[in-house]
Image (cartoon, helix red, strand yellow):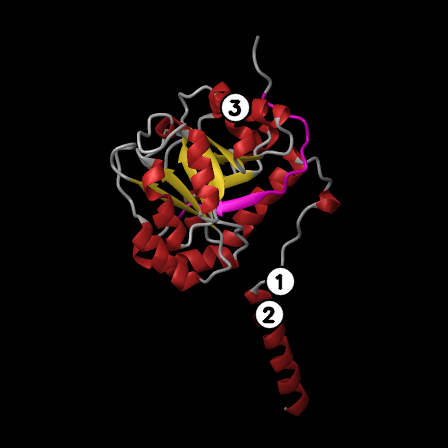
Amino acid sequence: MSTPCCASPHCVECAIGPSMLASDLSNLSSNAKSVIAAGADELHLDVMDGHFVPNITWGAPVIKCLRKSVGEDAYFDCHMMVSSPSQWVKDIADAGGSRYCFHLEAALTDSNINSSVVELCKLIRSCGMEVGVALKPGTDVSAVRDFVSLVDMVLVMTVEPGFGGQKFMPNMMPKVVHLRDTFPNLNIQVDGGLSPSTIDVAAKAGANSIVAGSAVFKAADKEEVILGLRNTVERLGMGRKEGELTKKVKTRGAEVGVLVAGLMFFAGKYM
């Protein structure tokens, strides 16, 4: 029996988190500020150790510097692709992490903690961060069922973790549908290959937290892409009507337009 790819409408608010891995890393701070200004709810920070995944990115020192630059209000969603997730909790908390999202596969084999997932969740909360748990594509969704009550979010990877720019895997959507229909109020994130061309599938499946990298950072109009992703989740996932969708906020360009119009008025008046 095939699993449907559409979940029941939910009421969990949409969150868009541009993946900083796809930004210009030589201008990490300015890129972070640009997507926040464009309407991003979170900054998705991929921490890779070269062991759990075959790539190395950044760690707590970079996150701490970024926190100082962008300010305390920005939400740092730290996706920990590391082999020993308990090892880095306090460092990420001290650096300014808002959510610590560990991989279930790593936590189940982490020898530094007792009772693995349970103790890890307690440790993360004791450090003042929200808790997220991530599933690799090859991990069955049933593996996380017993831990949903301990976390704030479940991340369903829609690519193999480790590198950005990969193609979206639509065959991961039954996991999302299962989670949404079983846990209607759960914060469900999808990460990997999300863009305007793939968001419909993820939204219909019930994902409310969208990580998008290249689709946002390579866009000429970041605000338009972020708003488009948000509206699709609101429409196809939450069942909102057109008049209920989030509207485009006034941009700096609009403010400039008002200023120019005013200057033209006064110029005409006194010419």
Q: Of the numbered discs in the image, which one, if any, rests on residue 146? A: 3
Residue at (43% x, 61% y) in the render: 70
**Visible residue check, residue 191:** no
- For the residue marked with disc 3, what is the amino acid? Asp
Q: Please name the residue that numbered disc 1 is placed on.
A: 250
Tally of numbered tags: 3
- Which mark is in front, 1 or 3? 3
Q: Is residue 10 magenta?
A: yes
Residue drawn at 63 percent across, 76 percent down: 261
Give the mark nearer the N terminus: 1 vs 2. 1
Which dot marks residue 143?
A: none
The extreme top residue here reads 1
Tell me: residue 222, above or below residue 262: above
Asked whether, in this view, residue 37 is left or right of residue 67, the answer is right
Amino acid type shown at disc 1:
Lys
Q: Residue at x 38, y 44 (%)?
A: 89
Which badge, 1 or 3, is on the more N-terminal residue? 3
Q: Disc 2 marks which amino acid?
A: Glu
Give the magenta range. 5-20
- The front one of 141 and 270 is 141
Which sits in the foreground, 28 or 74?
A: 74
Please say if the residues under marks 3 and 2 sit with CB atoms less than 8 Å apart: no
Spatial CA distance of label 3 from label 2 is 50 Å
Q: Write down the quadrant of residue 167 in the picture.
A: top left
Q: Tell me the CA gap for discs 1 and 2.
A: 7 Å
Q: Which mark is residue 255?
A: 2
